[in-house]
Amino acid sequence: MNKLFLDTRVLDKNIRETCGLSEEIMMENAAGAIEKVVAEHTLTNVRYISRPTVLVLCGSGNNGADGYALARRLISHKLSVVCCQVSQPKSELCKIQKLRAEKIGVRFIDIYELDSFLEEKSFDLEVIVDCIFGSGLRLPLSPEAAAVIESVNKNDAYKVACDVPTGLDENGNGNTIFFADETVTMGALKYSLYSDVAKDFVGKISVADLGVSRDAFETETFLPHSFVLEYSDAVLPIRKKQNVNKGSFGHAAIISGEKSGAAQIASFAALNFGAGLVTMVGENKSSSAEIMSSEKIPENTSAIAIGMGLGRNTEYAEKYILQALDFAEEKRIKFILDADICYSAKVSDFLEKFDCVITPHPKEFSALLKSCGIGDVTVNEILKEKTKFAKEFCEKYKKAVLLLKGANTMIASWSDKNSRVEFYINPIGTAALAKGGSGDVLAGLISALLAQGYNTINAAVTASLVHGKLSTEFKNNFSLSPLKLISRLDEVVARP
């Protein structure tokens, strides 16, 4: 698990003051980190007509200064290095670094020469480095910067972003964005790199040390905005004791609704992820000998999943919502709430009274916010400010863990210890999961862990990580199906 920061300028300032590091020293370290990446993609290729060429796009501030410093360093590798001045230097360091690069022989072009340069160097151009804007960008981009980004994005050269791809704001939103194959971010990870939008633009992410270790840079004096999860954060339900029986691993009840296939998928996932017993509850019977069926929630149930294929505002849905609520009043029970339950006026009854994990996608979250009286919020508004609305939700429902699905899944929950909402981002997962039934698998995985005694946040984190990891195991990401996901559980969970 790694810390994410909304703005690292305060961390920069702290290191300068406590360690006596100047901005120039930190800038040299930043340029050195990108230099290593560029060298990996230029010095091993022998196909060039003349010399491998590196194009550095430079803005007017200290991100541009990083670019000029990089260009000066790259000249020593006998590369052809060209800086495109997207805007004239404004910060003092940018002016100084440009002068140094000019004196050592770096070539400069302006934005009006860019297209002809790209055509001229089409064979030798190996790397394009984006040093136009770093973190803290306020949208929109200038027309000139947007035009530059659009031009270079069409080029096949390897693309490296300095700090944050130009075009991403602090929330990870943007329209015209530099399409990086790799992002070298400075000092610490930024939240903007892990938005849903950013996933298509950041490429591989690494952190550059700016003269001190990352631990020293990320001092505990400053609280992170959120955390990014790693697969090693998953705590798998490995059975360590031998003197056990099926009752030792809980009983997951999966409410079956109008579309019983959703409950069937969730039931298979729960059984394959360690639940000792799984029962499909409803009028639709299980089609498998492995999954039990009942019209009532079994007395020994330890976790209930409700919402998948349930139906919205129907007499059937109301019947089983009330049954689940009545059952839970008498039992110590945990819930996984999904899909159609987000549209129910009764959803707040679950959220207020019981430990829950609720797993909407943005459209369902929009409906959920309305159902809970938080607000009439559009999907686009949610996508632009996920943490804002997740925070409002978790502050109101402090028993609930929100798992907001997306390209980078967000998990949010209220922390009694820290008296605030904490956010966890799961970046593991692929477009393979964009298929009907994938969410039902996730609901089943969470219900299995809740049934086995996991608390809600650990169940959400572990199930989400495993679910995402499963999606990376397929060669052709279009071929994934829910049952294929489940079938790989015995393989993927055993790997680090």
Image (cartoon, helix red, strand yellow):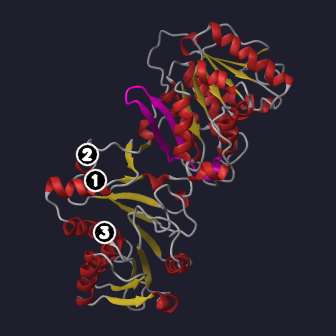
Give the spatial CA distance, label 3 vs label 2: 26 Å
Image position, residue 309 (x, y; %): 77, 32
Query: Mark 1 falls on what kind of element?
Result: helix
Q: Are marks 2 and 1 in contact (CB under 8 Å)?
A: yes
Q: In percent of the image, x 34 and y 90: which residue is there?
A: 107
> 332 above or below 180?
above
Q: In this rendering, is residue 65 above or below 409?
A: below
Reading the image, the residue beneath label 1 is 11
Mark 3 neighbour density, 10 Å: few (under 14) some (14–19) many (20 or more) = few
Look at mark 2 in the image and give the residue it sits on: 219
Q: Which is closer to the viewer, label 3 or label 1? A: 1
Q: Give the amino acid type for the residue marked by disc 1 in the picture.
A: Leu
Location of residue 460 in the rendering, given as x and y in whole percent from the top left corner? 53, 32
Query: In which image quadrant can residue 276 be found?
Result: top right
Q: CA distance from mark 2 to mark 1?
A: 8 Å
Front residue (pair 5, 310): 5
**Badge 3 is on which residue?**
36
User: From the viewer's perspective, is 273 left or right of 363?
Assistant: left
**Measured along the vertical axis of the image, is residue 391 above or below residue 7?**
above
Q: Which residues are magenta?
A: 409-433
Residue occupying the point 28% across, 48% down: 218
Quadrant location of the N terminus in the rendered image: top left
